[in-house]
């Protein structure tokens, strides 16, 4: 999405009575990965996985006034209405921005899943070699400790969800950081 559309979309959403606030995403530095600590398949897997993970890390927080208990249908109707009301935007741009909301449970569940096979980062553990494997595995375990069911997540007020998601993002970044390549030394 081009920056000018992002700004237009944020103006449209900020003016909508259902949106209580839009909080920009944190600025996360891309981490250079030490590929020597990964198997060949692990290198491919991390190359495919990192863009998805950074997509979550860099997602804005769109806080609305829809009740989590039963508000999903209302929110879907509202999204359809607001998209239909703004044909001046490129097709899909408004939907894409709203779908990127960091507070959406579906964006988080594959990062905090307790089942390692369902957890995107957990699946990468098998491809990490050497001392980095234990460090990475421990970081993923700390992330998995945050796993919630949809019902548990939905029971939190908006402020609680915001703090929860910020902590998930921090732990995801910490896990990726364990794979950081050592800085190059220049003599």
Image: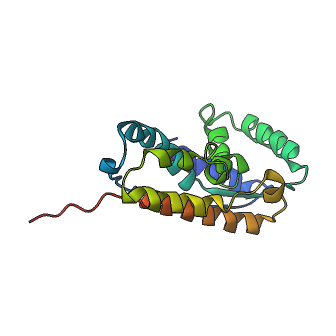
> Left or right: 74 with respect to 36?
right
How has the structure been colored for display? rainbow
Furthest residue in direction top, as rendered = 91
Furthest residue in direction left, as rendered = 187
Front residue of 179/70: it is 179
Q: Identify the residue at horizontal 25%, vertical 62% (top origin).
A: 183
Furthest residue in direction right, as rendered = 70
> Left or right: 149 with respect to 34?
right
> Left or right: 2 with respect to 105?
left
Q: For residue 93, say whether it is visible.
A: yes
Looking at the image, residue 2 lies above or below residue 101? above
The image position of residue 7, as x and y in percent, is 56, 51
- How many marks the image carries: the answer is 0
The image position of residue 22, as x and y in percent, is 66, 60
Q: Identify the residue at horizontal 30%, vertical 48% (top origin).
A: 36
In the rendered image, which quarter is residue 123 located in? top right
The image position of residue 62, as x and y in percent, is 69, 56
Q: Identify the residue at horizontal 55%, vertical 65% (top origin).
A: 170
Q: For residue 24, say whether it is visible.
A: no
Front residue of 46/100: it is 46
Q: Identify the residue at horizontal 49%, vertical 59% (top origin).
A: 175
Quadrant in which the C terminus appears: bottom left
The image position of residue 40, as x and y in percent, is 35, 37
């Amino acid at each position: 999405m081009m920056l000018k559309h992002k700004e237009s979309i944020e103006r449209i959403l900020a003016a909508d009575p259902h949106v209580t606030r839009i909080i920009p995403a944190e600025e996360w530095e891309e981490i250079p990965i030490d590929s020597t600590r990964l198997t060949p398949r692990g290198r491919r897997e991390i190359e495919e996985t990192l863009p998805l993970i950074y997509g979550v890390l860099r997602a804005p927080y769109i806080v609305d006034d829809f009740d989590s208990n039963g508000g999903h249908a209302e929110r879907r109707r509202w999204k359809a209405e607001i998209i239909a009301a703004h044909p001046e935007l490129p097709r899909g741009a408004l939907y894409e921005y709203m779908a990127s909301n960091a507070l959406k449970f579906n964006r988080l569940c594959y990062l905090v899943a307790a089942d390692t096979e369902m957890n995107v980062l957990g699946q990468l553990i098998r491809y990490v070699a050497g001392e980095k494997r234990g460090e990475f595995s421990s970081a993923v375990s700390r992330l998995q400790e945050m796993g919630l069911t949809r019902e548990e997540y939905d029971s939190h007020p908006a402020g609680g969800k915001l703090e929860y998601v910020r902590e998930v993002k921090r732990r995801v970044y910490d896990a990726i950081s364990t794979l950081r390549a050592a800085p190059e030394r220049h003599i």
